[in-house]
Structures are given as C-alpha cells and as structure tokens.
Amino acid sequence: MEHHLPASQPRPQKALPLLPELPPLSQDDLENLKPQDWAGGFRIRPGFYEINGACAFPHGVNFTIVSFAAVSCQLLLFRRTEQTPYARIPFPPHYRVGNVYSMFVFDLKIDEFEYAYSIDGPYNPKKGLIFDKTKYLLDPYAKAVTGQSEWGKRLSPEGFYKARVVHNNFRWDLPSQTFPPLKDCIIYEMHVRGFTKDPSSSVAHPGTFAGIEEKIPYLKDLGINAVEFMPIFEFDETRGMRTVNGRRLLDYWGYNPVCFFAPNTSYTSESEYNREGTELKHLINVLHQNGIQVILDVVFNHTAEGNEMGPYFSFKGFDNQIYYMLTPEGYYYNFSGCGNTLNCNHPVVRELILDCLRYWVTQYHVDGFRFDLASILGRSEDASPMSRPPLLESLAYDPILYGVDLIAEAWDAGGLYQVGSFPSWNRWAEWNGKYRDDIRSFLKGDDGYIGAAASRILGSPDLYPPEKRGKDVSVNFITCHDGFTLYDLYAYNEKHNWDNGWNNTDGANDNRSWNCGEEGETNNPGILALRFKMIKNACAVLLSSRGTPMFFAGDEFGNTQFGNNNAYCQDNEISWLDWTLTEKNEEILDFFRFMIHLRRDHPILRQDTSPCSLPFPFTSLHGTTPWKQDLGWKDKMLGVLFAGKDQQGKDDILYLGINTYWEPIEVELPSLPQEFYWVPIADTSRGAEAIIHQKEVLSQNRYLLQSRSVCLFQVKS
C-alpha cells in the first residue's frame, strides 16, 4: 500500500539557529579531544566520521571526506589568495574507517587558511577510475568557495578551487507572518544579477543580493509573495567565455554548478570571507519579514566538470565512477545536455543531495526548491527510469524538508518527459510545461486547443487527478527564463539568437509565438496595441487559472530580450531588466498589479471554497451561450465560471471570457436572480482602460467580446 503525505498547509515559523553549527558534543567530549599524532607539523587525531565536510570546533577543525576507490588522501592548506599549499597533512591509514577519511586538526584558525584535497588511487578510465594525485580537489561539502569572488574574472591559471571553513552565527528574525501554501503563492522567477544590473534599476548595489533587497518595496507593491532565484550555487561564469559581435559572453545563467553547498560569492556586493553567505541570509531574512518566500532553482542533474574534455576539480577526483553515470566504456552519459549526468540514486550521491537541501533549509531558511531537469533524479545507475526512485522518495518523506515546496521540472535532455506522471508521493509539484504550450497555442488562435486550454485553466485535472496527486501540484507558467519573454512572445515569430555565436541553431524552435504583424521592434501603433492586448490576455488567463502562477521577472512591464530565446550567455542589456519600461509600459504593469491583487482577493480563483448562494458549481465551462461547452476543433471562445464564497462568507462569483478569434463574438453569461447582476471588471480590448473602474451593468447578461481579448466579470447584488 502506498502511503501519501498530506497536502501542503500553512508553514510553521522556523527555528532560530543562533549558535555555530556544531555536532551534539558535550563539554567533556570537547575537553577529551587530545592529540594522538603529528602529521605535516600539526597535531591531529581521528575525527568525527559522521560529519561530512569541514567543521570548526573550539579546539580546531574536523575534516571528513568519502572515497570508495582512493588509496590515500592528503589535506592541503593554503594561505589566503595563494596558489601553493603551505602545508600537506596526510590522513594516516588508521584514520580511514570503511570508505571515510576523517581527521581533526588542532589549533587551526579558520580566518587564516583555505583548503583542498589531493587524492591518489587507480587509473583505469574504462572502469571510470581516473584518480590523479597532482590535482587539487574542492571538497564536495564545501560551504564557501574561493577564487570566484569577482564577477567575470577567470580562475587562476592553475584552474582549481579552494574552500573555506565558515562561521555560522547569523541571527535570524522570526517571520512576520505564517507563509501560505503553494496554491496561494505568486512566484516571480528572477536572475539575481540581471534583476538589478542595468543602470536603470537605480540601486546602490546593482547585480547583487543587496540590489534585490533594495527592490523589495517594488515586489510588495506588485503583490509578489514568492521569489524563485535562478541558480545561486557557486558556479564559474567564465566557463566558455568568448566574444561574439563585440560582446563578452559568459555562463550567465549559472546552470553549471561548481559546489552545491556554497552560495555564489560574486553575487555579493562586498567581498565576503568566512561569513557563510551573510548577505544572502540577510536578503532572505528581510524578504521573510515582508511576507515573501524564497525558492531556489537547484541543479543536481550535472556539474561544471563536463565530459571527458571538461575540467577536473572535485567529483571526478573523489570518485568519478560513483558521482557520474558512465557508459560501459567509461564515458559520460549526457542526459543533462551539459556533458555529464550526476548519478543521483547512488547512496553516496543521494546522501549528499539530502544533506545539501537540509543545509539550505536549516542554515538559509529556504522555503522551497525547483529542481532543474528533475527527471534525471529518477534515473537508475544504468540511466533507465525508475518507478520508485529512492532519491525522490527520500526527499518526499524527509522530516527536515517536510515543510518546504518541492517543484520538479519534470523532463530531461535525454527525452524523458514526465509532466503529469512524475513520481510524487502526493508531495511533489511540477512545472506544468503542457500549460505553457496549450495556453500559448490557444491564445494565439490555433485550432484544436480550446479543450486543452479549458483543462489547464481548471488546474489540469487530466494531468493531476486530485484524488491521486492532491491540489497543489500544477505550477502554471506561460514564460520563464528559458524561452521568449512575454513581450517577445508577441513580437517575434522566430528566435533571434545570432548574438549567442551558434548561427541561431541554439534555443527552442517550438515557441508558439506570434509577432502580431511585424517581426521585432515597430512603431506601428496598431501592432503595438495588439501586442499589449495579447500580453494582458496572457496575464489575465495565467492569474485566473487554478494552480500556482509563475512568471519571469520583467514580463510585468514588457521587458524584451530582442528575440533571443536562449539568453544563457548574455550578461548585458539583452538579459538585464530595463526598468525604464515600468514607465513606458505602465499600462501593462498596472494590469499585472490589478490581476495579482484580484487573485489574492478572490479565493475562488485558487481553490474550491464553500458553495455560493446561487445554484452554481465551483467551476464550470461555457460557450457563447451559458452551460453549453463549445470545445470543437474550430471554436475560439471559452467561458469559465468560478463560484463560491470569499473570506467574509460573501458570494464570490467570477466569469472569465476568452475570445481568441480575429472578430468580435457576442456571449451570454449565466442568468442570475433579480437582485444580482453582472459587472465587467476587466476588458483587455480597452487598451490603457482595460481595468474597468466605473460600474457597468450588463444588459440581458450579454456582452460583446472584442477580437483577441479577455474579459472578467463579477456578480454584484
């Protein structure tokens, strides 16, 4: 019998870890720490084998690493900024228990050194064994990484990373409120650097965590209560650095992690040392005080070490044959599309991922995770999909992770597509890629999508039956970092990725976009008005749909990437938000703000409430006449009725009318008792007056839906 976890619920307030992160040792234990050996001029003794990574104690530092096939290991100590170790401390053979090396080194002051490892072992590439004792290796459990603190500056010629042992004494405030479940969130996806890097952001610390903090009043005014940060794990933005068309291209997005436990140091406004992400913690703390949750986009499907031709700086040197999926010949499977694939369901890798997520929850108070190419996390060591992947099940039932959101990008680059079928244990939500595709096609006016669009607006019950998957499953989006911005979706028929340097061969070809009559920028007022209307249509449908809405930062004011639908390498005006558009395209911003607050104020858009006083079901579909569902191949008009009660127990009845046809269509709304009447509250065909403030009572419950427009109506009495 399969057990199910309960659906998500309001989160309890988090604990406040105020002391350094030390294992549960008594004072007697600490006093009994006595040196047993000398090595490399240091006093040492066997360490604490259950504590992975490096951990500071009052008397020294504990170092623990795992390697199944190594034959010896050395700890390397460096002075700050230096590339040659000042000390090599070998782990004595009797300090190894099983496959764990652990050593306690006395009298080390963590502000005075950086560290790495040198590991020796067999070399047999056909079996995946590629040990090289000449390489300096980064600790997989490193909490802070040195060498990348200045954005865009290459590593030293030696090309290796060092780690720091960190303090952990940040003082957290209690959240100002209890955070809502996922279905009540408005997720705002953003790139940490691109959000404020452009001078138009007018912040004191552009492109940093501190820059985001300066924009919190904007996020609150917009109505955002959850931000999703694109990857903030330590990564090397200079990977593949090159110049194309006069622009320096970088690994800007950050989807090639160097270390899973360490925040990207180049996202800080000031150089941090031994402070364990203080600026990021401060940002999260302030976001929480303002009622905004934090979701991290995490990448556990591959690393920046790449394939056989890629760098060798960490996992390859510890246990290449364990950390990566390898072919029988010893080559790297590439289900990530980035050169290698992490062997996520090996017990060692599974433990590392669990430890990592627990760390981000307990030490950074993160509220949720979006897993990049999450289907890889369900592949076995031979790369085949598993019916009950141990890692996904462990994450679903882990007690520390129980209160956080787990969101899967339910596909991978190897062709495994699991939207609607991702292993969930009633615990995992999904990025609903079918919502994106079906709604894009329907709003564009394509034939045959009205039935699919209706299902997506109602929460995709065909994909996520409530009795099997719960109700907080579908994360709905029309745009995200990957693909066109919302403005570009209606400004370009084709991708324009020439500035990426791949002859426009990169990026998706299936965009389901429409340029409204001219490709790219135009001064034609009619085309611009149509584009603005299409953007508002998408906004209205997204924020009226059951499920959790998510959109990409800048979509709310018409930000453009100039037709680039794969801006992963563009650290420039192509990817940076142009904040001058908040004034230029103010009518779009106002409409987004209106729809976000409308969704917040009308719970019937988010869930079934108690029944209303009229004989209406919670949700129903309508055509040009009420209670008749016209879902034929050529049909272009869809009506969706939501009916229930609001927080005060008053009737909460809304009608969403969508006309994707190129001509007006008259519709009749459901009839009401004499004391009730329909009032239009939004009509995207009215341009800058799309938000209807004056009271307009429908005559005979009829309304003319203009071409390619979306309207919202509310029952009044």
Image (cartoon, helix red, strand yellow):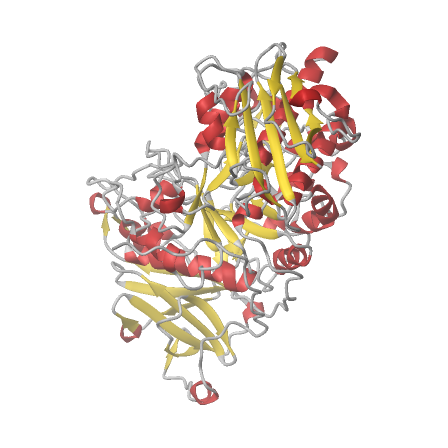
Is residue 560 visible in this depiction of the protein?
no
* Quarter containing the N terminus: bottom left
Residue 650 shown left or right of residue 109 in the figure: right
Residue 187 screen position, x and y as percent: 58, 43
Say which of 241 and 690 sits in front. Answer: 690
Residue 466 screen position, x and y as percent: 40, 44
Residue 409 screen position, x and y as percent: 43, 40
Residue 383 shown left or right of residue 639 in the figure: left
Is residue 536 visible in this depiction of the protein?
yes
* Residue that appears at 65% across and 66% down: 173
Compared to residue 31, the image places residue 373 above or below, namely above
Compared to residue 193, the image places residue 319 above or below, namely below
Say which of 662 and 531 sits in front. Answer: 662
* Quarter containing the C terminus: top right
> Residue 188 lies in what quarter of the image?
top right
Name the residue furthest front. 674
* Residue that appears at 71% across and 24% down: 698
Residue 463 shown left or right of residue 216 in the figure: left
* Residue that appears at 54% across and 38% down: 253
Residue 238 screen position, x and y as percent: 53, 39
Compared to residue 13, the image places residue 232 above or below, namely above
